Each structure stands twice: as C-alpha cells, then as structure tokens.
C-alpha cells in the first residue's frame, strides 16, 4: 500500500499498539504515578523468551516514568553499564542538575569533630553507590525519583550485581528509586538464584508470554486503522492463526501483509502472501538463531520431547533419554554452553 507501513518488525521498537500487556502497563503506570512510591511494582523483573516484547515494554515504561517526572536511565546489562547509568541520568536531569561541578572532598580530618571540606571543580567520583547518592540528593529539591531499566539481564555480570546490591540499600534508605529489569527465562532464573542478588527474588516477576488471539486482532485492527486501512475477515482469521500469539510475528505478518496489498481492505490472497514472507523471516531470523544457541544437552532434551503431541512429562523424557541419571547429567550440562566463558556483555544476537 502507498501509505507508510505502520508495523514495526524490528527488535526493541515500541509498537504502535501493544497487543495485550494492558494489565502490566496499567499497573506500572499506577506505580509510577503514585507519589508515595511504595508500590511493589517499582522493583519488577520482566521474564520472557525472545521476541515477546521485553525491550519494547521497558521503553514504554521508561516513557511513562518520564511523563510522571522520573529521571530515567535505560541500559543493557554489560561491562560499563554502571557508568552508563550515571551518564544517562545526568543527561536526563541536565536541566535540573549541573554535572560539570561535582563536589570533591578536599580533606577529611577526624578529631573531636568531623570536618569535611569541599572543593568545587575537580570531580570526585566515589564509587557507584556514592555517585548515585549524590544524584538522589541533587534531585531531592525537585521531588524527582530515579528509574533504572536494565535489559538483557544475565548471570555472572559483576556490574549488575553491584547495581542490584546498591539498589537494595537505596530502598532501605528510603530513596525514591525504581528498578525494572528484563531477561530471558534461563538467565533470570540463574541470576535470581545466585546468593549475591537474592534481593531480586522478592522483585515482582512478570512473565511475558503468548498473547491471546482477541488481543492480537485488536492490535492488528488499530495499527491498520492508524493509516486508514481495514482487512477482510477471512484475511484477519488467517493472520491471527499465523501469528499464534507471538508479538514479533504480529509485526512481521502485519508488515508483509501491508507490503503485499495494493489497496485497503487487505484481501485473503494478499494476507496469505504476507504470511508466507513473514514465516520465512521468522524462521531465518529468530528460530535459526535460537536453535544455534542451544547446547547439545538442550537439543537431546528437545528431541526427546518430539514424540509428544501435547506437554511432555519429565518421566517420559527421562525414559527416552536413557533413564533418570542421564537426564540429570543433561540438565546439569544445560547452562548455555555457547555463552560459557563470555564476559558480561551482549549475547549473540539474531538481528
Ligand atoms: N505486545 C506487543 N504487541 C505488538 N507488537 C509487539 C508487542 N511487544 C513487542 N512487539 C514487537 O515485537 C518485536 C519484538 O519486541 P522486543 O524487541 O521488545 O522483544 P524482546 O522480548 O526484547 O526480544 P529479545 O529477547 O530478542 O531481546 C518488536 O518488533 C516489537 O515492536
Ligand atoms: Mg530485547
């Protein structure tokens, strides 16, 4: 169609209309709007497989927070993320605080009285928690809270551990702080079970999964309507079936249906061509990359599930894999072999 394509089939993009996720976004908006800042939703972990919309949700929550006067830093778990948080916060609060004149402690003498002399000019950085405390203090007169969002959380990330430990102190000390994180289920569960960040076990965990067909349909219709387009009912039914509740596929199917249609309403034949193109892109992009990330143990486990039409039981899988002992060994092997030994940083990407 002539009009600009309103679908967003690229990772991390906030969709024109979120399918589903209404209760999550409403709860977050309410928590961010509440001046008491005591909602448990202010420490949230979004957990979901690839392409379910974690990054898009973080982006949307960040925008909502900014609209409510929060100072927001959106970062990805990585070596260097702590510096990134400070710099993003300073950037976001540029019109409230002046980062060029941080305070340096010139001398500290300890006698009968504590005396601290300050020197303006040369930056005294202090550790990350100190720098954050200074930002909280600078923002206090304005009543602004700080929201940090961390995408792609992963196990064994030293800076992420520092951040979460310090964050626990911010909450205890009554600072106006919020933390929303997102990650793949395997990484989140490995991270949360580590002793160092046990505080995250108490975070509100939101599982980001499949979206219901009715919500998929509403989002498709609204996105088309943004550009004044509609779709025939048989074409809509085919699209909803192909999308099967997967947010990324919603964008791919919508995008390619749009590209394959000459005029509105979208007809069944155009939808079917679009669905074929979308399916190919999903297979070559996400599915192939996800498959490559699996360890040999993961693959043997999945093969053992294939004979089942519905959900598999562990007992059946164990039998097919050669007994419970073998299963135990395979499960132990599971921690994503392909990532082992990597420094904390972005995972191999599919895009
Ligand atoms: N609720 C939704 N409704 C419609 N489209 C969505 C929804 N959530 C995400 N999308 C779209 O799906 C695609 C994938 O979203 P996103 O990149 O946020 O997924 P992700 O979970 O972060 O994936 P990954 O784990 O690979 O980083 C994007 O094109 C985004 O615009
Ligand atoms: Mg993402």
Image (cartoon, rainbow, N blue to C red):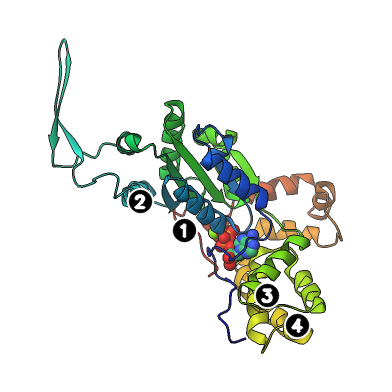
Q: Is residue 125 above or below residue 169?
A: below
Question: At which x and y percent is residue 126?
Answer: 26, 36
Question: At which x and y percent is residue 301?
Answer: 73, 56
Q: Earlier in the sequence, mark 3 or mark 4?
A: 3
Q: Are marks 3 and 4 in contact (CB under 8 Å)?
A: no
Where is mark 2, residue-wise?
Answer: 92
| Mark 1 element type | loop
Q: Residues within 10 Å of mark 1 (few under 14, many from 20)?
A: some
Viewer-nearest of labels 2 and 1?
2
Q: Earlier in the sequence, mark 1 or mark 4?
A: 4
Where is mark 4, residue-wise?
Answer: 272
Q: Residues within 10 Å of mark 4 (few under 14, many from 20)?
A: some
Q: Earlier in the sequence, mark 2 or mark 1?
A: 2
Question: At which x and y percent is residue 212?
Answer: 76, 59
Where is mark 1, residue-wise?
Answer: 346
Which one is nearer the viewer's eye here, 263 or 277?
A: 263
- Ligand 2: image quarter: bottom right
Viewer-nearest of labels 4 and 2?
2
Viewer-nearest of labels 1 and 4?
4
**Whole-number angstrom distance, CA of label 1 to CA of label 3:** 28 Å
Q: Residue at x 63, y 66 (%)?
A: 248
Q: Is residue 98 above or below residue 8?
A: above
Where is mark 3, residue-wise?
Answer: 253
Q: Are marks 1 and 3 in contact (CB under 8 Å)?
A: no
Viewer-nearest of labels 3 and 2?
2
| Mark 4 element type | helix
Q: Earlier in the sequence, mark 3 or mark 2?
A: 2
């Amino acid at each position: 169609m002539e009009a600009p394509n309103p679908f967003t089939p690229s990772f991390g993009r906030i969709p024109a209309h979120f399918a589903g996720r209404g209760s999550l976004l409403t709860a977050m908006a309410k928590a961010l709007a509440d001046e008491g800042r005591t909602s448990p939703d202010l420490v949230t972990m979004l957990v979901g497989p690839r392409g379910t919309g974690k990054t898009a949700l973080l982006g949307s929550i960040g925008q909502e927070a900014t609209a409510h006067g929060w100072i927001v830093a959106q970062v990805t778990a990585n070596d260097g993320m702590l510096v990134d948080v400070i710099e993003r916060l300073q950037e976001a609060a540029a019109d409230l605080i002046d980062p060029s004149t941080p305070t340096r402690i010139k001398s500290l003498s300890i006698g009968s009285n504590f005396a601290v002399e300050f020197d303006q000019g040369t930056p005294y950085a202090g550790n990350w928690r100190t720098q954050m405390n200074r930002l909280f203090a600078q923002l206090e007169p304005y009543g602004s809270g700080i929201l940090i969002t961390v995408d792609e959380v992963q196990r064994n990330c030293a800076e992420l551990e520092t951040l979460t430990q310090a964050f626990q102190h911010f909450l205890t000390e009554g600072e106006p702080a919020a933390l929303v994180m997102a990650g793949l289920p395997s990484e989140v569960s490995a991270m949360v079970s580590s002793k160092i960040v046990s505080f995250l076990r108490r975070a509100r965990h939101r599982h980001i999964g499949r979206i219901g067909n009715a919500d998929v349909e509403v989002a498709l219709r609204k996105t088309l309507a943004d550009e004044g387009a509609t779709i025939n009912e048989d074409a809509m039914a085919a699209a909803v079936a192909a999308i099967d509740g997967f947010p990324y596929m919603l964008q791919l199917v919508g995008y390619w249906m749009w590209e394959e249609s000459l005029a509105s309403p979208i007809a069944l034949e155009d939808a079917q061509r679009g669905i074929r193109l979308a399916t190919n892109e999903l297979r070559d992009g996400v599915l192939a990359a996800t498959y490559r990330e699996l360890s040999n143990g993961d693959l043997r486990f999945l093969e053992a599930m294939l004979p089942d039409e519905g959900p598999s039981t562990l007992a059946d899988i164990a039998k097919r894999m050669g007994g419970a002992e073998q299963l135990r060994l395979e499960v132990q092997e599971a921690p994503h072999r392909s990532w082992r030994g990597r420094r904390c940083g972005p995972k191999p990407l599919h895009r």
